[in-house]
Amino acid sequence: MTTHLLGIRHHGPGSARAVAARLAELEPDVVLIEGPPEADQLVDLATDEDMRPPVAVLAYAADDVSRAAFWPFAVFSPEWQALRYAAEAGVPVRFCDLPAAHQFALGDEDRMPRTDPLAELAAAGGYDDPERWWDDVVESRRGGESPFEVIAEAMTALREDDRPADIHEQRREAYMRGVLRKTRKEGFERIAVVCGAWHVPALADPLPPASHDQTVLKGLPKRKVVCTWVPWTHGRLATASGYGAGVRSPGWYHHLFTTADEVTARWLTAVAGVLRKEDLPVSTAHVIEAVRLAETLAALRGRSSAGLSEVDAATRSVLCSGDDVQADLVTRKLVVGERLGEVPESVPQAPLAADLIATARRLRLKREPTARELDLDLRTPGGLDRSRLLHRLRLLEIPWGSPEISATRSKGTFRETWTLCWEPGFEVDLVAAAVHGTTVASAASNRVREAMAGKPPLADITTAVEGCLLGGLGDALPEVLTALDVRAAADTDVADLMTSLPPLARSTRYGDVRGTDTAQLREVADRLLTRVCAGLPPAVHGIDDDAARKFCDLVDNVHEATTLLGDAARERWLAALGKLAGRDSLPPLLAGRIVRLLHDADLFDSAEVELRLGRALTPGVEPAAGAAYVEGFFAGGALLLVHDEHMLRVVDTWLGTIPSDVFTEVLPLLRRTFGAFAGPEKRAIGERAATLSGGAPTARLAADELDEIRARSALPVLATLLGAAS
């Protein structure tokens, strides 16, 4: 009876290649793999032709989905190669790590940070980068002697050091030894154990007494656990994703494992392909020179072949001409990559996840890890169904799609643009959402109903109304509208009412294209607007600057929303603003904003606006108050100052009357207003201001016409304006 311990690094192509070769040589009659034993029922699926890595074992507590964990596998993961070998050879295979049932029940309180053993070995070998050391000695190896004996010896030397005991690691290794003892008792003669290199010394003979391990494991709590396979991505295997056993370059490791020859040339050819897709000029000659540089660097550094650092240097200097942006593009798309795996339909799934997969397949929505834009025409059945699915998922807090909101797009209801990007973590979200229903539609409806039962804020209710209409959840809409009517009648906070009105107004547009009756919705929105118009004047009386800024945004949003509620609602809102504009107690910022809105609606002509602006900017008014009025009024754009000379003259005269000692205090307020204008607008205002005294616009001087003495005298003023004065 012999036991062979194959110490590996998770997700390493050299380790994976060595494991495959060693197993073929040993021909074991059983294989033990570090991983949750609950996944033993899933190993037969590893050979399914529809199973394409990267994939992961997902385990979660049946009574609390928040307690979940993934065990990822790529094609270059040693554990995956061991699984494939055992399944294809007809050899029993078992996972031997501490069960997830115990791990989920124990929590993380007993875990301690451990010194990285690779970093210690790398330092002993004269490396300052453990990734580079492991890549040199293991991952870039092709053929040669088995590395497992050397790895075991190195780890044994490291573990001889007296370290604080990590009870979690003790439990894991005690359980692994228990599985090993049980396997031996069952009569297996040639046992292969594939585990993390750190654990090899703990599993080597002679094993400690079984009673010792039983004591360590005695009384461990348990939780019921469910396991399944889910798709994974290379991006989630990367260290940058936060994955503890991650690697820096999954895409490069995949290339190392799957490419038999000409590794450097094929890789740099792929790099050239990525750059060419971005319309960047990369020729065959560039690739040849990059290959030569990578191989020369490897030779100078004493490496048998070019590694990632060499091909990265060649990519940056030759193919990217030193451009960091282009180099980062290659890293994102190729070095890390975003390959998404696939699992067969026979994999056990929760009903909700199965419904989503079937619906997405019917609607031809492919789950992809890279962001892509999807333009939907809601007048077509396919476009409408896709929109409803994505909106329903958002109600379930599964943001597969993010709607694009752009001021340049039409406000019509017949077209939507989404950005789709599938995240593997959504698999857990689907499991969590399954408590609400077995289909996406029923789960979204039930989720909305449950939210309404909790008496949410008014703004959340109006958002739910919009979500029901966008998601086609007509069965849940009556309950939401009832909750809206009750809450709106009881809510006395005008700011809450104003926050709630815009989504409600947007929702009234969806009846024509989505086939939803919005008559009741319009009635609720109309009553809400009536209460806003009545409650706004007392709500803004005597408020401070911060509150005034908040109400400016609210007024803007309601003003835009009333354009969707019809002419009668619009006239009622404008009448309320007209009355409010006559109040002297309005904060200057809000007063300026309301006057601008009334001017844009043709209720205040230019003469009236100039009169009000002149009053706000008279010498008797505090300059800070005048600046706030200017900010509120001109936040809508600078064209008025460009085209209305009288208005420009009022502002110019006011600026000239501000005392110099006060001007520096007002300047930040003015900069916030005028700094937001577009460059051509600011240039046009300056040219118009230069003509106010009756002169012509100042022509640009040639270099030899510049009066340096006069120009130098203006420098202190410019320094003050730019905030650079000493």
Image (cartoon, rainbow, N blue to C red):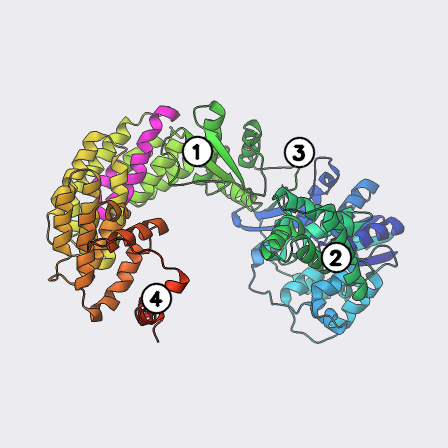
* Residue placed most toward the observer, 263 or 420: 263
Q: Secondary structure at mark 1?
A: strand
- Tell me, for residue 195, which label it has, or none: 2
Q: Which residue is mark 1?
A: 416
Q: Secondary structure at mark 3?
A: loop
Q: Quick one: quadrant of the N terminus?
A: bottom right
Q: Which residue is mark 3?
A: 346
* Span highlighted in magenta in the image: 485-513
The amino acid at mark 1 is Glu
Q: Nearer the viewer, mark 3 or mark 1?
A: 1
| Residue 298, image quadrant | bottom right
Q: Earlier in the sequence, mark 1 or mark 4?
A: 1
Mark pair 3, 1: CA separation: 35 Å
Overall secondary structure of the magenta section? helix
Mark pair 2, 1: CA separation: 50 Å
* Residue placed most toward the observer, 279 or 203: 279
Q: Nearer the viewer, mark 3 or mark 4?
A: 4
Q: Position of residue 456 (x, y in %)?
A: 32, 45
Residue at point 74%, 40% (across, down): 44
Residue at point 34%, 73% (across, down): 725
Q: Are marks 3 and 4 in contact (CB under 8 Å)?
A: no
Q: Which residue is mark 4?
A: 722
Q: Is residue 183 left or right of residue 642?
A: right
Q: Is residue 530 left or right of residue 465?
A: left
CA neighbours of label 4 inside 10 A, class few (<14), some (14 to 19), many (20+):
few
The amino acid at mark 4 is Leu
Mark pair 4, 2: CA separation: 63 Å
CA neighbours of label 3 inside 10 A, class few (<14), some (14 to 19), many (20+):
few
